Amino acid sequence: MPDLLSGKAAVVTGASSGNGRAIARTFAEHGADVVVADIQEEPRLGGTPTHELIVEETSSEASFVNCDVTSNDDLRAAVKQADEYGGIDVMVNNAGVFAHNEDLFSVTESDYRKMMDINSKGAYFGSQFAAEKMQETGGGNIINLSSINGDVGTKSNVAYCASKGAVRVMTYAMADALGPDIRVNAIHPGMIQTAQIVKDYEHLEEEKRQERLDTIPLERQGRPEEIAKAALFLASDLASYVNASSLVVDGGVKNTR
Ligand SMILES: NC(=O)c1ccc[n+]([C@@H]2O[C@H](COP(=O)([O-])OP(=O)(O)OC[C@H]3O[C@@H](n4cnc5c(N)ncnc54)[C@H](O)[C@@H]3O)[C@@H](O)[C@H]2O)c1
């Protein structure tokens, strides 16, 4: 099934690194032209910028747009950039930030606002602008990156849980608002080997890391490519009757703890 997204145009926020980068590359391998919308071109773990890699490795087109998802003007511009490829068919609201060991009492108003602005508000308006365009052109689909922390509350990151819980329920509400021509679904990753884990987790002592790994029935962290395969399924016609749904990709943590 090499061309599940043939002729489609996708915008992926936060696609310079991690899950977004894998999603953008997988979509391009399956025929989609991709707009990489991020605050930086360089992948957080190094390597060739995503849009350049796509052009090198696939026959799809790709471009980078400087987009901070907290800015509605930037989000509008990212959606517009897909006009170069015939207009947006798939929007992936992936850009997000995490906070480790975020104690309930130490979170300031500005910490909270930042978390909500990027993780929740970015997904809301990314969806709104994409959906406006999709309604003009006959439809499409939207994928929002939530987290297992959008389902399960943990004391070590309360504000992050708030931001990702909002993404989960807004996904359901948007699906209700945008049917029948636009599907909206969420992906809930567990612990995936991206900069959010590899880099931002560096301070976690070995014992704590092992403790977290021990909660995963598959006994390993996930790979960004495994999130990308879930996104490919949701973006394609394989998921034509999947809507307002939460796809959990976590090696089994959420339902076994
Ligand atoms: N890695 C995990 O274990 C994990 C688990 C659950 C959910 N997620 C979610 O997956 C998504 C991607 O995370 P990741 O692990 O790939 O992280 P990452 O840090 O590897 O990549 C995030 C990308 O988002 C970009 N970004 C950050 N702020 C932005 C902004 N304001 N506007 C535009 N782009 C911005 C960064 O530049 C980076 O390229 C996030 O929504 C995250 O919450 C990740």
Image (cartoon, rainbow, N blue to C red):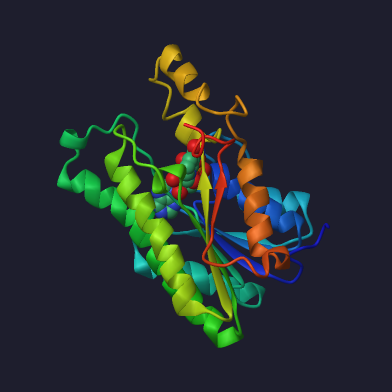
- Residue 227 percent coordinates (x, y): 61, 46
Residue drawn where x is 19% and y is 47% of the image: 110
| Residue at 41%, 47% in the rendered image | 151
Q: Is residue 246 left or right of residue 53?
A: left
Task: Write down the quadrant of residue 58 in the picture.
Answer: bottom right
| Residue 118 screen position, x and y as percent | 35, 53
Judge whether residue 69 can be spotted in this image.
no
Asked where in the image residue 72 lies, by quadrant, the reply is bottom left
Q: Is 49 displayed left or right of 196 in the figure? A: right
The x, y position of residue 10, in whole percent, is 61, 65
Q: Residue at x 35, y 57 (%)?
A: 166
Residue in front for this viewpoint, 234 or 117: 234
From the viewer's perspective, tell me whether residue 257 is left or right of residue 225.
left
Q: Position of residue 162 (x, y in %)?
A: 31, 49
- Compared to residue 12, the image places residue 21 above or below, namely above
Q: Quadrant of the N terminus?
A: bottom right
Of residue 209 and residue 98, the one placed in the foreground of this image is 209
